[in-house]
Image (cartoon, grey):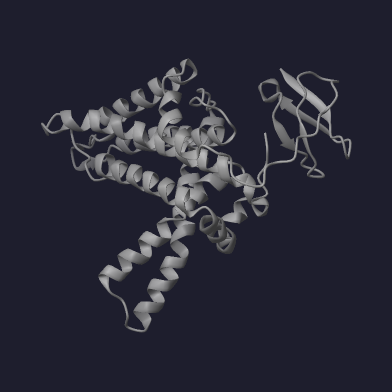
Amino acid sequence: MSISCECPKCGRVCGFIDEYAGRRVRCLHCSTRFIIPAHDGEQIELPEVEPEGPLPGFYTAVFKESWQAFIQKESVTGIVLCIALTIFHFFIGDKDYSFDLPGLRFQGQIGWVVTIITAGYLLWYFIETINITANNCDFLPEIGIGDGFAFAGAVIKSIYFFIAPFAVAAIPAAIILNALSWIGLSFGWLDVVIITIAMIMVPINLSILACNIAPWMLFRYDRTILIISKSWRPYLMTTGITLVSFLLIFLTVGYFATDTKENPAAAIMLPARILTVFVALFAMRTIGLYARHYFHCFPELEVPEY
């Protein structure tokens, strides 16, 4: 089912799925904001003037309401999917499937294929978690990544959505580190400090992509730094939670890749990986809540509304 309506300013016909009824949107042709009607032909309402300050209750939403999202009935299938993917990757993705044939060794790449698929699906779910949280949903996303080429495209896009924020954040750090090395001022501790400061930009870059803001905004370091400086307390907390989740992913998946049949510690790592997925979902919801409570305060972001 879909809803068709005309922009109240330019008359351009806009179409939306019916579950978006009542949400605020921006006309892609003239940028006029309006509210999606419940049915075709209904009178279109214009939204009320947005508040100048951030929405209240950010910390309550993060530490109290976020965990409630995990027990909503709409979230059950998504949680089961994340756990199933984690278990599947744990038993299949970490193994070496290579074997010897007369005169050659066959390199089994099944583990890599499983890793890419499960990582892509989980990253898609993380991006969707940021997106629907930013758009006032208090449950985890429903399952529906597509099939065939749509599935492959979603996997590649989701992996890109996580690589790009790190890469863009690392560009200034790389320039500074190379400049310091060129003049002979490169120190180990200084490199760590500069890289850590650069990684502070990762959550806002993730939220920019997840909220469908123009990707070129990733390279407007002046704007992102200004936004961070105006909301530095909640943003630093968001960054801390996000980086902790990434560290746990590195420790339980990247650093500790083992054959479950050979390493007795593997039995401990499986629940650790499942716990890491929950921490990562909590971090993604925190990023989405930051976008929900603060992004409307910064018109320079040109945030699209749904």
Picture residue at 23% right of the left edge, 29% below the top: 270
Which quadrant: the N terminus?
Answer: top right
Picture residue at 40% right of the left edge, 34% below the top: 63
Can you see residue 226? yes
Task: Determine which quarter of the picture holds residue 98.
Answer: top left
Between 298 and 3, the residue placed more toward the observer is: 298
Up the image or down, 251 lies above or below 132; here it is below
Where does the image place residue 201, in percent across and percent down from the top left? Answer: 47, 55
Looking at the image, which residue sits at the far bottom? Answer: 183
Up the image or down, 281 lies above or below 304; here it is above
Task: Determine which quarter of the picture holds residue 283.
Answer: top left
Between 154 and 25, the residue placed more toward the observer is: 25
Picture residue at 10% right of the left edge, 31% below the top: 264
Which quadrant: the C terminus?
Answer: top right
In the rendered structure, the answer to whether residue 46 lies left or right of residue 140 reads: right
Where does the image place residue 90, in percent across and percent down from the top left? Answer: 26, 30
Can you see residue 213? no
Between 52 and 80, the residue placed more toward the observer is: 52
